[in-house]
Image: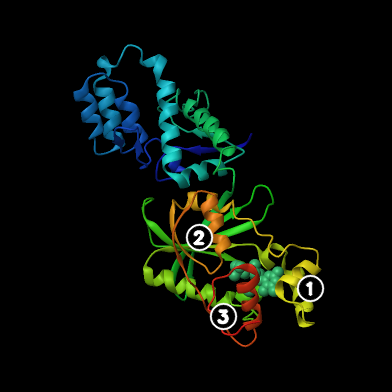
């Protein structure tokens, strides 16, 4: 494995790997503030000690209580502790979605708890320790990396994105099968059980960036930003599916055929493509990362509603997003309505 990632302090880079990091876990009966709270409590059969640790204000307090009652640790603890730690990490990295994807993204680096105080779970500060926590994390990482939804998309990095509608967070992803890069823009915060306003926006360079009037994409993208800013929360999944999946240059070839009279479906087919090549299954990975399970989907395209439902996303509502109709795209929109099933109040028939 390549150069090691050293972690220890929760506030330091890669601090989310620490058992002291503030990520709650639920064991099916109780929610624990951190892995450390859960782990220390499992040492004891005495319910009063367990309760004290459960209510400890910080992971350091939980650790101190575990030490304070050292003589009352269950006799089989040495045989049990690895399984307890493995269960705790499984809960932490699967119940807190983003860090599960962050963990997978640490491949292929070795993970080492760089602790001068602990040469069992850590490296003992100088590498003589067993680093058992690092090894359990790498084992879990390997498991998650081949398990949906973690294997559907790879999280790369996030950054702020100031826009005309407010400061969004930008999250970059890569499709592990195709290498295609996708972006999610998020605004505000939500709980997993809330329904979130989202837009699945397929990349359209001409509409989104070159102010084209041949389509409605740019207007729809602006409206999506506006709607989310007004709602206070939401996400735009900006999917690199240019040309309904045929790519920019083939879309220009398709436009050329349309300039000679073909419609948008006939042009795709004349080039040897189906009318729409787009796939959406990787969106399940992006939405899982964003902790989004229920959506109000801004689209006129029923295929996107169907596609999300097929991958288990609960589309509770379709929000129409009819924008930017004009004399240059009226035929295109009419064909999208008649041939591609778009739900549009088309201004004039084909
Ligand atoms: N292949 C193709 N032919 C055209 O004539 C087009 N205008 C496009 N545009 C692409 O369609 C997608 C947006 O459509 P939805 O509203 O999301 O169904 C996007 O990929 C554009 O690049 N493509
Ligand atoms: Zn477009």
In the displayed structure image, the side of residue 259 where residue 126 appears, left or right = left
Disc 2 beta carbon < 8 A from ligand 1?
no
Q: Residues within 10 Å of mark 2 (few under 14, many from 20)?
A: few
Looking at the image, is mark 2 or mark 1 nearer the viewer? Answer: 1
Residue at 59% across, 77% down: 216
| Helix, strand or loop status at disc 1 | helix
| Helix, strand or loop status at disc 3 | loop
Q: Locate residue 115, reporting x and y percent.
A: 44, 31
Q: Is residue 324 depicted above or below 320 in this figure?
A: below
> What is the C-alpha distance between the residues marked 2 and 1?
35 Å
Q: Residues within 10 Å of mark 1 (few under 14, many from 20)?
A: some
Does residue 300 show up? yes
For marks 1 and 3, the one nearer the N-term is 1
> What is the C-alpha distance between the residues marked 3 and 2?
39 Å
Which residue in the structure is indicated by mark 3?
346
Q: Locate residue 53, reporting x and y percent.
A: 25, 30
Check contact, mark 1 vs mark 3: CB within 8 A.
no
For marks 2 and 1, the one nearer the N-term is 2
Taking the view exactly as shown, the residue that stands out farthest to the bottom is 327
Taking the view exactly as shown, the residue that stands out farthest to the top is 75
> What is the C-alpha distance between the residues marked 1 and 3?
25 Å
- Split into quadrants, the picture shows ligand 2 in the one at bottom right
Which residue in the structure is indicated by mark 1?
253
């Amino acid at each position: 494995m390549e150069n090691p990632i050293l972690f220890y302090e929760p506030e330091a880079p890669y601090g989310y790997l620490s058992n002291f990091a503030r990520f709650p876990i639920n064991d099916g009966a109780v929610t624990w503030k951190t892995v450390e709270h859960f782990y220390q409590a499992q040492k004891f059969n005495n319910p009063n000690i367990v309760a004290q640790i459960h209510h400890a204000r910080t992971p350091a307090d939980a650790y101190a209580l575990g030490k304070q009652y050292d003589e009352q640790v269950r006799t089989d603890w040495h045989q049990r502790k690895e399984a307890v730690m493995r269960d705790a990490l499984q809960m932490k990295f699967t119940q807190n979605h983003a860090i599960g994807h962050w963990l997978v993204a640490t491949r292929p680096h070795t993970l080492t708890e760089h602790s001068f105080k602990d040469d069992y779970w850590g490296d003992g500060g100088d590498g003589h320790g067993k680093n058992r926590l690092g090894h359990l994390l790498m084992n879990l990482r390997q498991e998650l990396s081949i398990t949906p939804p973690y294997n559907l998309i790879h999280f790369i990095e996030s950054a702020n994105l100031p826009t005309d509608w407010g400061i969004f967070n930008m999250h970059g992803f890569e499709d592990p099968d195709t290498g295609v890069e996708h972006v999610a823009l998020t605004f505000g915060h939500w709980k997993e059980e809330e329904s979130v306003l989202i837009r699945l926006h397929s990349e359209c360079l001409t509409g989104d960036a070159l102010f084209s009037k041949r389509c409605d994409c740019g207007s729809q993208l602006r409206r999506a930003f506006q709607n989310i800013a007004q709602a206070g929360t939401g996400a735009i999944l900006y999917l690199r599916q240019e040309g309904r999946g045929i790519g920019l240059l083939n879309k220009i070839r398709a436009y050329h055929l349309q300039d000679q009279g073909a419609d948008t479906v006939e042009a795709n087919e004349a080039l040897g493509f189906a009318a729409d090549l787009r796939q959406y299954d990787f969106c399940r990975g992006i939405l899982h990362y964003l902790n989004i399970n229920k959506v109000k989907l801004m689209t006129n395209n029923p295929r996107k509603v169907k596609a999300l439902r097929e991958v288990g996303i609960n589309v509770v509502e379709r929000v129409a997003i009819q924008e930017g109709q004009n004399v240059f795209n009226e035929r295109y929109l009419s064909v999208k309505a008649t041939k591609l099933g778009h739900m549009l109040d088309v201004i004039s028939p084909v």
